[in-house]
Image (cartoon, helix red, strand yellow):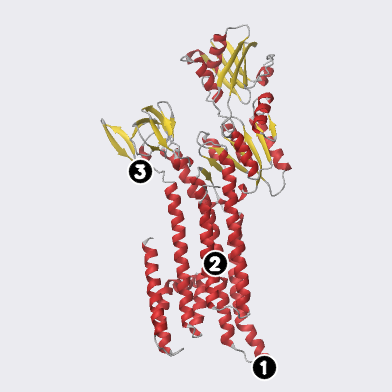
Amino acid sequence: MNKKQKKVLMRIIAAAAMMVVLLLLPLEEKSIFRFLLFLIPYFTIGYDILLKAFKGIRNKQVFDENFLMAVATIGAMALGEYTEGVAVMLFYQIGELFQSYAIGKSRRNISALMDIRPDFANVMIDGSLTQVDPDEVEVGSEIIVQPGEKIPIDGVVLDGTSTLDTAALTGESVPRSVKPADEVISGCINMSGVLKIRTTKEFGESTASKILDLVENASSKKSKPENFISKFARVYTPVVCYSAVALALLPPVVSLLIGIDANWSQWVYRALTFLVISCPCALVISIPLTFFAGIGGASKAGVLVKGSNYLDMLSKAKIAVMDKTGTLTEGVFKVTKIVPVNVTKEELLEKTAIAEVYSNHPISKSLKEAYGKPINTGSVADVEEISGHGVKAVIGGITVNVGNEKLMEKIGVTAQSVREPGTVIHVAFNGNYAGYILISDELKPTSKAAISAMKHAGILNTVMLTGDSAQVAEIVAGDLGLDKVYAELLPADKVTKVEELLATKKEKEQLIFVGDGINDAPVLSRADIGIAMGALGSDAAIEAADVVLMDDDPMKIAKAINIAKKCMRIVYENIYFAIGIKIACLILGAIGLANMWLAIFADVGVMVIAVLNAIRALRVHNV
């Protein structure tokens, strides 16, 4: 509890104690002396509310909860209901304190979960380690991370072995082992050995900074229920104020016109009760708090959601479209077969690896690993990457084309037909077919279970898009239990397929696309909800996505959907509960069956229950 909250708590205790003492004193009902005594606890507990109401009137922003409380309590005091006037203000402040504490607790929980911002980086200066601000470390610098310290900036391990605690990033408790040449990301905690790391990014572009930025800015993107509540409150509050005025004036006036006692005090009391009941605190506070808690809970589970609007949309996801490589498969390719035609195996592999020397594609890396020798880049000239087809390069005067069957067709070469599972890399030297290399990828261990979990979470149609051959794609789709598969697609073809699926879905259904590569960025942007496999995915994919999975586990797709559904369920529970109780109590208040004590429950009690319900969105362990 912070200083401000403690101060309010002391005022509550003091006002409550004074009110109890005054109730025990034998004071004459509605006497001036009793009124003056009750003003002491009233102003002790309510001076700030009255001040805010006055400022709202002065700034022409009259209709808010402070105005409602001020009018209701001043009116109660004027009618001689001193106990109820003080009690309304007292319980309202108790509710406000509880709300402030609950929101603060949620923020502290989320801050603790996302406590990944490093305080310093250890840089070697003049032979000794010096702690500097991470913002001051340049790309390519060498930093030292001691056991127990956070990795401050993304980089590559130069020396040392250790295990890393990645729980704050991925939500997973299993430590990750690292060794020289492994990539590491900021925000992880070094658990054992000393690591020397060469930085590959600036601090502002590192993983920890991006995650914090995503979480901090998530509240700026409002969901439909949040926008509805904002509009509702702007219309609702003036309407109930005018209704209260009508309730206070019209029945007495009508009574006078027909010759009956007007009973002004009774109708004014009912109007004041009506005002207290009508306060929209429960809705205005609990709905944003639910989304805030939902985003925080998702972050804890390693699912970063860029805004509450995406939680709303994700809860309605019915079509899941996924890339294959790196999403459903490991993306770790290995050369499993080399079939030369009129050349040797060694020559075929060597020239293919050299042609791919400048590419960072996983297939290119597997070719270089299979070659296993240093590559002399001096022999390579005129390297050209042909999107969706392959690579063309001139090596020692020989034109080498490396790619798929479409590339062979494009250069007029007849490729050998291959009916084996895996990615086939066809190669041509100077326009003559030189053979093929078969590269295999493995399914992720959780991919099959992930597809099943998605269907259990409400996904009706699972689709895989891939640039791989139809044969390989059909095998993978069959193993995973996917509903549809589209193969041999260029990046532009993936966008087209997603647009076709978007055109056929029902209006309220949402389509998600899950990918990890730079080629997936256009599709991630085009889908209703783009989900990037974030830990190893490209920066472009992460920027284009609406949701980021930090540990590349496809099981997190269903997890994200279930978190969104739980969050939206709580949102609508609070909306229906708060509005239902308000309407019932407003009717009772209007016909005189509700007093100020019921009004206090309808305001403060409903708000407390709604806030407690909202905090449940933080708990996502068993979702």
Asked if labels 2 and 3 touch by Cβ distance under 8 angstroms, the answer is no
Whether residue 578 is situated above or below residue 142 in the rendered picture: below
Q: Which mark is residue 617?
A: none
Q: Give the residue number, with chain letter if any, for mark 2.
A: 606
Amino acid type, callout 2:
Val
Which residue is depicted at the point 57% across and 45% down? 560
Q: Earlier in the sequence, mark 3 or mark 2?
A: 3
Front one among 356 and 571? 571
- CA separation, marks 3 and 1? 78 Å
Q: Position of residue 537 (x, y in %)?
A: 53, 34
Taking 102 as reference, is 62 above or below it? below
> Measured along the vertical axis of the image, is residue 37 above or below residue 325?
below
Q: Of label 1 and label 2, which has the lower sequence position?
A: 1
Q: Quadrant of residue 486?
A: top right
Asked if residue 212 is positioned above or below residue 415 in the image, the reply reads: below
Distance from label 1 to label 2 (Cα)?
40 Å
Q: Quadrant of the N terminus?
A: bottom left
Kindly identify the amino acid type of the residue bearing the numbered disc 1.
Gly
Q: Secondary structure at mark 2?
A: helix
CA neighbours of label 2 inside 10 A, class few (<14), some (14 to 19), many (20+): many
Residue 62 visible? The answer is no
Q: Amino acid at mark 3?
A: Asp
Secondary structure beneath label 3: loop
Distance CA(mark 3)–CA(mark 2): 42 Å
Could you tell me which secondary element the residue under label 1 belongs to?
A: loop
Q: Going 63% across and 31% down the picture, which residue do you hit?
A: 491
What residue sits 53% from the left and 63% below the top?
609
Residue under circle 3? 119
Identify the residue position indicated by label 1 in the image.
259
Q: Can you tell which of label 3 and label 2 is closer to the viewer?
A: 2
Mark 3 or mark 1: name the one nearer the start of the chain: 3
